[in-house]
Image: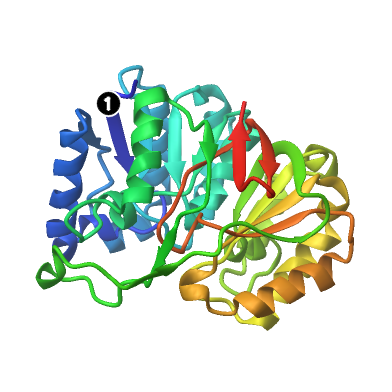
Amino acid sequence: MVKNVAIVSLSSGIMGESFVEFEKNIGIKRLEDFGLNVRFMPHALLGLEYIKDHPEKRALDLLDALRDPDIDMILCAIGGDDTYRLLPYLFENDELKEAATDKIFLGFSDTTINHFMLHKVGMTTFYGQAFLPDVCELATDMLPYTKNYFQELIATGTIHEITPSDVWYEERTEFSPEKVGTSTPSHPNKGFELLQGPATFSGKILGGCIDSMYDFFDGERYEDMPVLCRKYHLFPDTKDWEGRIILLETSEEKPSPEKFKKALEYLKSTGVFEAVSGVLVGKPQNEIYADEYKKLLVEVISNPKLPIIFNVNIGHATPRCIIPFGVEAVVDANNQIIRFK
């Protein structure tokens, strides 16, 4: 059972800004109501500019949280866009390898890059939720589907199975104290959609936000990101992908079909789709480009025998489940369930 939670800002430092303090306080109370002791790592609340300018301090917070025997769980504040800049401070002298542990690490979005870092040193991690977007939800409570998985993780230290949410919610467009206690419209959810291939398959899951994975290979956002990712061999080689399931989900930027296609083509060029046992794809935010994405997945992957499941409630569309990385999973589209061993 989780007792002590450390919150880190590994990408954006927005959690330290005064205009989100009311959200932070909502989240702290909810975590304390779960019986958790909450600790913010030393640099996590120093704001946007400081966090942007000091990737070495972000890395230090992660390393210190991993090393601290009193911390049971590391919870990311939110995503962002430049956590790749931690790479030299975590890998140049094997700092992350020496700090690696079996404690829980939870985050999504740009945190995809951190998941790949931790995978590189042999850690199992958990993808799908974060402090500000989920625990600090402005409704009267965390969204029920989201809350159920978060409670399971802190109570048991793992996730045993996931099923689709009955509904999905439109994303908030305004975050202010006046919106506290309000809900966004919800719509019926379709469940897991099998686009092609066998309905049942298995393997350990790895992946995350496809926008972040695009940046592994393309310097459009940051010119030095592909350079650093290659230097530290962050993207696993084809052999490491063999028998795994790759998870892909799209960000709040709602990548155009053209960009989504290019990202898939980058991934295909690595041989990943020839190595994995299946593909899980998250529901796009507000279902934007859902039909276009489904068509492109089948066309670009161009391997009819490879199972592709679309519309998993993970990542940037709410509500969100939590998916363990590095744990054997059995996906059963017919029975609408993914079980973890």
Relative to 171, is 99 above or below?
A: above
User: Is residue 270 something one can see in this rendering?
Assistant: yes
Counting the numbered discs, the total is 1
Q: Quadrant of residue 332?
A: top right
Is 72 located above or below residue 53 in the figure?
above
Q: Which of 21 and 331 is in front in this view?
A: 331
Q: Where is residue 238, by image quadrant?
A: top right
User: Which quadrant does the N terminus fall into?
Assistant: top left
**Left or right of residue 59: residue 244:** right
Q: Residues within 10 Å of mark 1 (few under 14, many from 20)?
A: some
Quadrant placement of the C terminus: top right
177 vs 239, left or right, is: left
Which residue is more in the foreground, 12 or 316?
A: 316
Relative horizontal placement of residue 158, taking residue 60 as reference (left or right): right
Q: Which residue is drawn at 23% across and 52% down?
A: 46
Three-letter code, disc 1: Asn
Counting from the top left corner in percent of width and height, residue 336 is at: 61, 48
Q: Residue 180: x percent and y percent?
A: 13, 64
Q: Can residue 61 be seen in this view?
A: no
x, y percent for residue 223: 62, 69
Residue at the spot of label 1: 4
Label 1 residue SS: strand
Q: Quadrant of residue 74?
A: top left
Q: Residue at x 42, y 57 (%)?
A: 79
Position in image of residue 36 (x %, y %): 22, 29
